Image (spheres, rainbow, N blue to C red):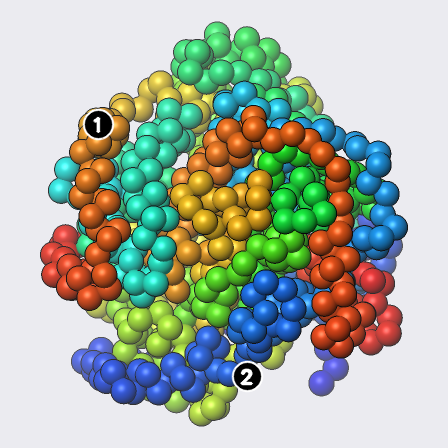
């Protein structure tokens, strides 16, 4: 059976590739062995941010190469790395407030509210509005809204104000989890018990059980109901 | 990319029997049936999927062909000619691999005051850790205990696990959750701060901690951010291609290769931690995989040449329900929860062929039998076999809205390709998920039989015995990454740098020659050969 083909342009050069492939597999079909621009191949890692344009359309579109299907006439390039600013900090010493975020990323306040970042997000996150939350010092909301960010960098690549949305986003998430969300009390108390040696002896004894004894204990476990 | 007209026709057979199946409960396998099914169809049990390795310290051990192929291969370096007199990096601790284990090791070794270099094949964080959705286990609630966790791990592993390693895993579990909480990792919590925890397969307590369905990604990006904050030197796109020795059985560093320029770098290190992940991308027995692009067993190959023993590598974890359609997501995991909620496995005649909640190995075998022997499966336009997973049954049982409420990520994954899993069934086939075994580690620091060589994470073997439980691999990488980082930096204080050698590679090459093995294969593989031209004989541009 003759495969149906589409014509795509990879960094300007035309290739005929089978219809239905993802951009990633189409590039491999064309002969590109990825070094950059390919990671988990499952939409989790943000390695394969891709910018493309369709014929007769001036707009630039974006997608993850591993999740986007090729279309006839697609004109594409990958942006596997973006030279964005990354502040370094000790999260423990920071406070979850606007001034501490702005100290690390003064460019945050340059946001023009143009919404280009939102249009550039392959995860369909509301990037502009999580940035707005960050600018209000609403760390909780910025952390929550940015949670699904893969840090692919396409937002920063398109930002006319040269802000680095995804790095600001992870800062807000770490601030939220470290300083805003209440601590797990049961966790702290279990850690205390462990460090006091509460389980040392019983665990040691378990490592010395033979298989039959272990199996018996295993089969007697009571299972916590759903 | 929704279903083709032909597939829509096939779906009618599934719809036609849905009402009947609603009342039907497929018989469970008897122990004898299960054993026979496994022996005939599970890749682990089929003798044709494996062979004994002819060279090295584990000579005679039976492992999958694809792994033996890369182990019975030649080095990228000519060990007699490669110059080792110019040292490019001289460090205390070299960490090879930038996933959860490598990043954890780097953070701890750095905190212990060691001069650390982390080298990784792709980007920092490009690893299976990033892809783990389900969660991370830790016995941190009052009605749970490390002892119960211990029992679960041992039972899951067929009681073959190394007890000392399991003890370390469960003992450290609450400690590493606390460490991650302190680092600002956004776990799912109740308003009062209590961790939201769920069951996983084989757990007796709800101890699965999660960060929505991005659990691994949240852990990985937090660790990565912290490695960068502490300005630990990281070389990306610089895989190790060989370990260095003292000429005998002690590890003294590694040779790295810049993947883009092919320039080689000599690293002298007092201790080395290998945390390069597993072998999913070797596509054992031609299976699709849930694994990251970089999972090509590089660490196993390098450690083996230096005398690291390999254990439990004849046990591979296949997840019964990987996506088999659309092509874009082939091999990706369809969570067990889909079957837990009542979705049945159905062939092209609309018939059930296995009770959907048999153990993973049995369900995988039954799907393979249905497709490959009984020929009652679907074959997609790319030649991928599969069976139906009748997801609309979920809403028939539990009511409309259940899928959006309980499986939102799964729903979005399919909706992206024009498939509404609430209305139409999905196509699944077993997928290669996890390397249960690996390099033998001597104790709970991850030190191997090779002096000054530590291994952590999926590259190591023994923690999970013959089968790992959900939620214990994220735990493994953080626990043993931290332990290896600490132990490697402690050990480095007592090591004097000395002569660097590739004599172990020369000896390995000699063994290969004596075993009569062809000289045309080179490893570690580094990048899987996925381009069209790499399958043309005699025209392989990768060599």
Near mark 2 (Cα within 10 A), the count class, few <14, some 14-19 or many ≥20, is few
B73 relative to B286 in the view: left or right: right
Task: Please tell me whether mark 1 sits on a helix, a strand or a loop.
Answer: loop
Disc number for residue B48:
2
Residue A112 position (above or below residue B439) = above
Kindly tell me whether residue B401 is visible in this rendering. no
Residue B157 position (above or below residue B8) = above
Foreground: B173 or B21? B173
Residue B156 position (above or below residue B427) = above
Q: Residue furthest front?
A: B248
In which chain is the residue bearing label 2?
B
- Distance from disc 2 to disc 1, alpha carbons, whole Å, reads 52 Å
| Labels 2 and 1 positioned on one and the same chain | no
Task: Find residue A207 and report its horizontal and vertical position in percent.
Answer: 26, 51
Q: Residue at x 82, y 40 (%)?
A: B84
Q: Residue at x 24, y 53 (%)?
A: A208
Which residue is the site of mark 1? A196
Q: Residue at x 44, y 54 (%)?
A: B412
In which chain is the residue bearing label 1?
A
Task: Please tell me whether mark 2 sits on a helix, a strand or a loop.
Answer: helix
Q: Residue at x 63, y 33 (%)?
A: B270
Foreground: B310 or B98? B310
Occupied quadrant, residue B274: top right
Disc number for residue B377:
none
Foreground: B265 or B43? B265
Task: Find residue A73 and report its horizontal and vertical position in percent.
Answer: 77, 58
In what quadrant of the picture does the N terminus of chain A appear?
A: bottom right
Task: Find residue B256 and report its horizontal and vertical position in percent.
Answer: 74, 43
């Amino acid at each position: 059976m003759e495969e149906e083909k589409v014509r795509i342009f990879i960094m300007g050069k035309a290739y005929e590739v089978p219809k239905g492939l993802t951009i990633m597999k189409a590039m491999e079909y064309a002969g590109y062995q990825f070094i950059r621009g390919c990671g988990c191949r499952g939409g989790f890692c943000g390695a394969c941010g891709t910018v493309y344009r369709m014929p007769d359309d001036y707009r630039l579109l974006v997608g993850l190469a591993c999740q986007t299907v090729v279309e006839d006439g697609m004109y594409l390039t990958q942006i596997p790395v973006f030279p964005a600013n990354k502040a370094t900090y000790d999260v423990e010493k920071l406070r979850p407030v606007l001034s501490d975020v702005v100290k690390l990323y003064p460019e945050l306040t340059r946001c023009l509210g143009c919404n280009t970042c939102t249009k550039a997000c392959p995860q369909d996150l509301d990037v502009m509005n999580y940035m707005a939350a960050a600018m209000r010092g609403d760390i909780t909301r910025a952390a929550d809204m940015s949670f699904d960010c893969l840090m692919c960098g396409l937002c920063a690549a398109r930002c006319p104000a040269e802000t680095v949305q995804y790095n600001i986003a992870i800062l807000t998430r770490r601030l939220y989890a470290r300083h805003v969300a209440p601590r797990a009390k049961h966790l702290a108390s279990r850690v205390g018990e462990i460090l006091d040696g509460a389980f040392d002896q019983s665990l040691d004894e378990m490592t010395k059980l033979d298989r039959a004894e272990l199996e018996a204990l295993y089969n007697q476990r009571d299972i916590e109901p759903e | 990319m929704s279903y083709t007209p032909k597939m829509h026709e096939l779906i009618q057979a599934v719809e036609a029997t849905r009402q009947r199946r609603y009342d039907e409960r497929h018989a469970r396998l008897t122990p004898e049936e299960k054993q026979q099914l496994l022996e005939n169809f599970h890749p682990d049990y089929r003798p044709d999927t494996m062979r004994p390795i002819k060279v090295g310290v584990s000579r005679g051990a039976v492992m999958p062909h694809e792994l033996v192929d890369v182990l019975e291969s030649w080095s990228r370096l000519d060990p007699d000619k490669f110059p080792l007199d110019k040292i490019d990096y001289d460090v205390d601790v070299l960490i090879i691999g930038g996933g959860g284990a490598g990043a954890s090791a780097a953070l701890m070794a750095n905190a212990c005051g060691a001069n650390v270099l982390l080298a990784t094949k792709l980007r920092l964080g490009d690893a299976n850790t990033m892809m783990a959705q389900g969660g991370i286990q830790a016995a941190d609630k009052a009605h749970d205990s490390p002892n119960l966790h211990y029992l679960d791990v041992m039972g899951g592993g067929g009681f073959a696990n190394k007890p000392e390693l399991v003890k370390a895993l469960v003992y450290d579990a609450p400690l590493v959750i606390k460490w991650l909480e302190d680092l600002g990792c956004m776990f799912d919590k109740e308003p009062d701060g209590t961790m939201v925890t769920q069951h996983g397969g084989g757990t007796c307590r709800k101890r699965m901690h999660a960060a929505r369905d991005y659990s691994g990604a949240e852990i990985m990006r937090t660790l990565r951010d912290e490695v960068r904050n502490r300005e630990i030197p990281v070389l990306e796109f610089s895989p190790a291609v060989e370990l260095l020795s003292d000429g005998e059985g002690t590890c003294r560093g590694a040779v790295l290769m810049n993947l883009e320029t092919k320039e080689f770098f000599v690293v002298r290190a007092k201790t080395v931690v290998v945390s390069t992940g597993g072998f999913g991308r070797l596509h054992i027995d031609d299976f699709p995989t849930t694994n990251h692009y970089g999972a090509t067993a590089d660490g196993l190959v390098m450690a083996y040449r230096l005398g690291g023993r390999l254990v439990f590598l004849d046990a591979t974890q296949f997840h019964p329900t990987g996506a088999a359609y659309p092509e874009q997501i082939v091999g990706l995991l369809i969570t067990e929860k889909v079957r837990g909620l009542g979705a049945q496995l159905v062939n092209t005649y609309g018939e059930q062929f296995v009770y959907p909640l048999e153990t993973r190995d049995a369900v995988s075998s039954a799907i393979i039998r249905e497709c490959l022997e009984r020929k009652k499966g679907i074959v997609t336009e790319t030649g991928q076999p599969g069976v139906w997973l009748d997801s609309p049954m979920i809403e028939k049982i539990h009511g409309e809205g259940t899928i959006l409420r309980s499986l939102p990520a799964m729903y979005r994954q399919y909706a992206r390709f024009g498939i509404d899993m609430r209305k139409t069934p999905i196509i699944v086939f077993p997928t290669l998920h996890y390397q249960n075994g690996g390099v033998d580690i001597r104790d709970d620091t991850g030190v191997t039989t090779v002096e000054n060589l530590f291994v952590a994470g999926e590259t190591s073997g023994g923690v999970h015995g013959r089968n790992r439980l959900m939620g214990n691999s994220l735990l493994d990488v953080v626990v043993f990454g931290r332990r290896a980082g600490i132990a490697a930096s402690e050990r480095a204080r007592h090591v004097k740098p000395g002569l660097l050698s590739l004599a172990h590679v020369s000896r390995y090459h000699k063994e290969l020659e004596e075993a009569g093995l062809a000289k045309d294969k080179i490893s570690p593989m580094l990048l899987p050969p996925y381009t069209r031209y790499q399958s043309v004989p005699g025209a392989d541009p990768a060599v």
